[in-house]
Amino acid sequence: SQPSSLTFQPVLERIATEIAQTPGRGRPADYIPALAACDPRRFGMAVAELDGTVYGVGDWRQPFSTQSITKVFTLALDLAREGDALWEHVGREPSGNPFNSLVQLEYENGIPRNPFINAGALVVTDRLQTRTGDAAGTLLEFLRAESGNERLAFDRDIAASETANGDRNAALAHFMASYGNIDNPVPVLLDQYFLQCSIAASCADLALATGFLARHGIRADGGRLLSRSQAKQINAIMLTCGTYDAAGDFAYRVGLPGKSGVGGGIIAVVPGRCTLCVWSPGLDDRGNSVAGVAALDRFTTLTGLSVF
Ligand code: GLN
């Protein structure tokens, strides 16, 4: 693995230096106190190769709130169990609206546009809950196995804070339930969804956990989670929907399947080659990390690695 470190480590160091010199970091999410307290100057970035070799720079081992990044993993875990039947309950089109928007649901009969906006993620978690009886636990176990980090855990304070500020997600869930598109009692679903969002993990953990999408569906232990085609499908949805109403700009600048969270993390996939995770808590007005997008933009520019 040494020759590869010669490939990625200098690139990461260069990006970290450039980011440190760039003013304007955006603002941390402020809807809950634990996220509002994050320092926007924090920055970490990790690259994982297909064999699990990881390179990193800055705060790449610092756990942060994964938030909507987890939507990728619950989608994969549910798709692996129920296959295409999932698509009767959630669409695959970019929404062009903010991640927590309600507006399209009424026109589309309670079927959310895609699995990465909150409405769609609630549907996916609901279905995983029905199939496993423990959606958040199934997710945590998967992330531990793929990252090799048994210490990954829920952040109960964040989950409680999300619950206390959860009116909008509750509204989304109840509204979809009125169309028959939610199976479980809404309070049960919300508990699972907020636990899911609360998982703390580092750039190293998340770059490793995303590996199955670069390995065309193969898990860290060599077992298959998804068919090659399903892995391609998830990568495609990440490219078109993973950064919400900024997905067009993200594809233009970065050119990789990616998924952001309001904790300031972004994962990205170079299929067949490597995975990335970058973290910096300052967000733009669409809820994507400012330094994170800039760092991924520099990575694909400097290395020439992209899906295009
Ligand atoms: N917990 C957040 C919410 O549901 C996650 C949103 C995000 O990361 N974009 O509003």
Image (spheres, helix red, strand yellow):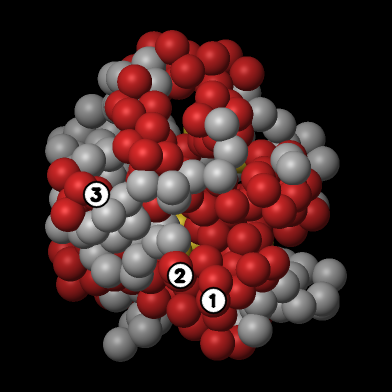
Residue type at tag 2: Trp
Q: Nearer the viewer, residue 85 or 139?
A: 85
Q: Nearer the viewer, residue 26 or 109?
A: 109
Determine the secondary structure under disc 2. helix
In the rendered view, does 110 fall on the left or right side of 126? left
Q: Position of residue 243 (x, y in %)?
A: 29, 55
In the rendered view, does 235 fall on the left or right side of 97? right
- Disc 1 and disc 3: Cα gap in Å? 21 Å
- Disc 2 and disc 3: Cα gap in Å? 15 Å
Q: Which residue position is annotated with label 1? A: 84
Q: Position of residue 283 (x, y in %)?
A: 25, 37
Q: Which mark is residue 99?
A: none
Residue type at tag 3: Leu
Q: Position of residue 164 (x, y in %)?
A: 43, 12
Q: How many marks?
A: 3
Q: Position of residue 308 (x, y in %)?
A: 30, 87
Q: How would you rate the neighbour count of disc 1 (Cα within 10 Å): few for under 14, some for 14-19, many for 20 or more? A: few
Q: Nearer the viewer, residue 137 or 179?
A: 179
Q: Residue at x 61, y 87 (%)?
A: 228
Mark yes or no: residue 45 visible: no
Q: Which residue position is annotated with label 2? A: 87
Q: Which residue position is annotated with label 3? A: 105
Q: How would you rate the neighbour count of disc 2 (Cα within 10 Å): few for under 14, some for 14-19, many for 20 or more? A: some
Residue type at tag 1: Asp
Image quarter of residue 176: top left
Determine the secondary structure under disc 3. helix
Image quarter of residue 300: bottom left
Q: Residue at x 72, y 72 (%)?
A: 225
Q: How would you rate the neighbour count of disc 3 (Cα within 10 Å): few for under 14, some for 14-19, many for 20 or more? A: some
**Relative vertical location of residue 273 with respect to residue 57 in this rendering, above or below:** below
Determine the secondary structure under disc 1. helix
